[in-house]
Amino acid sequence: MPGPSELDPAPPGPGNDAALAESGRRDSRPTGRAAQLSSSQLRPGWTTGACAAAGAKAAWVALHSGDFPDPVEVTLPQGRQPAFALTTETLGDDSASAAVTKDAGDDPDVTHGAVIRATVRAGAPGSGVRFVAGPGVGTITRPGLPLPVGEPAINPMPRRYITENLVAASRELGLVGPDATEVDAVVEVSVDGGEQLAGRTWNPRIGIVGGISILGTTGVVVPYSCSAWIASIHEGIDVARASGAGHAAACTGSTSEATVTALYPGVEVLDMGDFAGAVLKYLRSHPLPRLTICGGIAKLSKLANGYLDLHSHRTQVDTGQLAELAAAAGAQPDLADQVRQATTVAQAVTQCADAGVDLAGAIVTAARQQALEVLRGAPVEVEVIGTDRRGTVLARAGW
């Protein structure tokens, strides 16, 4: 399995700190997730989505060639190309199955060591790739999640890169032309013991029944080293100040980073992750003229509630507080009750928007107020931008 070096950016060039400050860029130093790996030397792992992609590609190749590639190389978002050893392989008359054992690296999660299986068969002409929940993979039973009720809990981004890897394999096998973007396939993903594992996750509470979810925006599990990440945030602020930058953007992840850099080309980006407190507390004594905080609306709802650590396992969304914000924004009592019972923040925001109530705006406004309170009067103008899962701006507050 690839080591941390394959995830790190290129090593620093011949420049020094002075040159770095003069350029006002941190391209020659790892930041955020990469800083964790380089500073802590923790070993990264792979998501259930990456494992499913590997199994699906290996099975698809075997279905059409008779041979399983082992190890099988897949392409993940951001261009990573890890290779996975197969745990099991089965070739039938009209289907093939391959499994990968999930390795979460040096920060093992609930699914570390789980066997992720993918079974593939040809789909009906023109059907594209259809996903099926096998044993141990959950099914969505409540609205408000990124996929409709009744769909297997295989998230949109893993579906995307599973499909892309099947298309790439089909091109290599000569099954489709070089410009093809779709293949017709049925992909069933299953997880050994997944229903039992799901009891240790949030799935039962949010209406995903029968197993775990297949997740992974980037395909990589980055082990948590809080000190390394926070140090990289502080360094980024120091570099921005030394270069005379007037504006920095603190982002919760790659989606929000893409959003904010499209809005403000050339802005100094701080890979904040879940550490809103680390950004704000450091800026309190090391101010920059302007700060944009950009993130998913669910994470920002935590900041709006006064949480400075936005991680999903350490702080939870408070739907009661969301209901209070909705009521203050004009929601009638029955709508506020719906918000209180919502499965996700996205569902609550949509319910309110349908009723003409700007809950997203109330969230970012409250989040901005919390940020200003942490800054304690430091000369920093603050803007907060909330996005949906695709990076579409839902609301802005400030400036």
Image (tube, grey):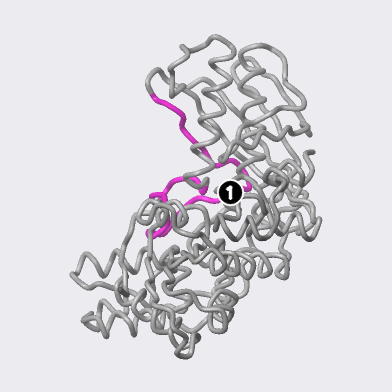
Extreme residue toward the top, this view: 174
Total marks placed: 1
Q: Which residues are magenta?
A: 127-153
Q: Is residue 140 magenta?
A: yes
Q: Quadrant of residue 24?
A: bottom right
With respect to residue 147, does 365 lie above or below?
below
Principal SS element in the magenta part?
loop
For image coordinates 22% across by 73% down, the residue present is 357
Q: Position of residue 244 (x, y in %)?
A: 49, 66
Q: Position of residue 339 (x, y in %)?
A: 34, 75
Image quadrant of residue 234? bottom right
Q: Count residues near mark 1 (Cα–Cα under 10 Å), then give few for <14, some for 14-19, many for 20+.
A: many
Image quadrant containing the N terminus: top right
Q: Is 49 on the left-hand or right-hand side of 266? A: right
**Residue 137 versus residue 124 in the image, above or below:** below
SS class, disc 1: loop
**Residue 241 seen by the camera:** yes
* Residue at the image position 72 percent from the left and 24 percent from the top: 90
The amino acid marked with disc number 1 is Gly
User: Image quadrant for the C terminus?
Assistant: bottom left
Residue 339 drawn above or below residue 200: below
Q: Where is residue 71? Give x, y as percent.
A: 76, 27
Vertical placement of residue 392 versus 5, above or below: below
Residue 68 located left or right of residue 327: right
Q: Nearer the viewer, residue 200 or 308?
A: 308
Residue shown at 51% from the left, 38% from the top:
132
Read off the residue under disc 1: 216
> Is residue 86 highlighted in magenta?
no
| Observer-nearest of 32 and 295 | 32
- Look at the image and tell me whether residue 343 can be seen: no
Q: Depth check: 146 or 272 in front?
A: 272
- What residue lies at 31% left-to-right and 62% top-to-bottom? 394
